[in-house]
Structure formats: C-alpha cells, structure tokens
Image: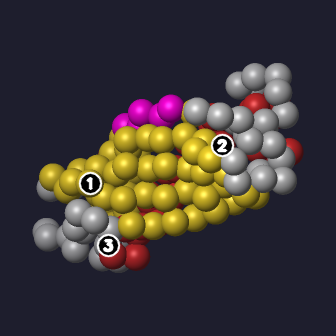
Amino acid sequence: MNFNIKKGIKNELFKIVTDKDTADVFGSGLSKVFSTPSLVSLMEHTAYSSVEELLPDGFSTVGIEINVKHKKASLPGQKILCKSVITKVEGKKIFFQVSAFDQQGEVGIASHIRYIINNQEFMNNLR
C-alpha cells in the first residue's frame, strides 16, 4: 500500500506547562520544572499528529525510536512550542526532526522514528 507521507511535512503544537508536567510529579527528578517525559510526550504527539490525517482509515503510527536532548528547564506557566518536520520516509518508517522552544529559547531537540501500522493487525498481534 502506498501512503501519502512525504519528506518536508511540518507540524507545530504548543502546550502550557502545568504542575502535572513537572519532574517531581513524573518521578524523574525533584524539581518543579517541565519533565523530560513530558517533553518526549509533546514531541511524539507533534510528530504523530502531522501524519495521522493523511493515513487511510484503520491505519496509524507508533513511535519506535526517539533520541532526545533536553537542553534547558521550563517552569509551570511557560508556553512550549514544538515543531516537527519529516526528514525521510522509507516504506512504513517515517523519520522526524523535532524541536521545542519556550520564551527563553530552545528547550530540546530530538530525532524520532514512527512506523505505520494497521490498527487491527497491530492489536491482534498483541494478544
């Protein structure tokens, strides 16, 4: 099956950091700053949502690899802007470059790979 996913597709999402997004809540640290798990979640969601509507009914993507550098802390109340771009497509593998920024600068960068799946087949294989 040929999917309409091409190099260069971009997406942007943002979120406001809340107390629920902080390292002390996630158990990834003691500080009340934007946690790395929250950053990864935002990055994956930005990449995922850039292609989801382009896929046929019954298909989706799953993240299979992410390499993240969390470069600076962000406080609750700060707005995080996340940007993704597809850098390469190999069959069902979609490669992304992702970056996130707050008002003071770059928060993090990542390379991310997602894989196109047939939802029903994927779930059946888990049983």
Front-most of residues 92 and 32? 32
Front-most of residues 65 and 85? 85
Q: Residue 64: where, in percent of width, then height?
A: 36, 41
Q: Around disc 1, counting alpha carbons within 10 Å, would you say few (fewer than 14), some (14 to 19), or many (20 or more)? A: some
Which residue carries the number 2 mark? 38
Q: Residue 82: where, in percent of width, then height?
A: 55, 56
Going 65% across and 43% down the picture, which residue do you hit?
A: 38
Going 55% across and 40% down the picture, which residue do you hit?
A: 108
Q: Amino acid at mark 2?
A: Ser
Q: Residue 61: where, in percent of width, then height?
A: 37, 57
Whole-number angstrom distance, CA of label 1 to CA of label 3: 18 Å
Tell me the SS state at disc 3: loop
Tell me the SS state at disc 1: strand
Going 50% across and 32% down the picture, which residue do you hit?
A: 69
Task: Examine the rendering and report whether any part of residue 10 can be seen.
Answer: yes
In which quadrant will I find the C terminus?
Answer: top left
Front-most of residues 111 and 45? 111
| Chain-order first, disc 1 or disc 3 | 3
Q: Residue 119: where, in percent of width, then height?
A: 37, 61
In the picture provided, is 17 more to the left or to the right than 44?
right
Tell me the SS state at disc 2: helix
Which residue carries the number 3 mark? 55
Camera-nearest label, 2 or 3 = 2
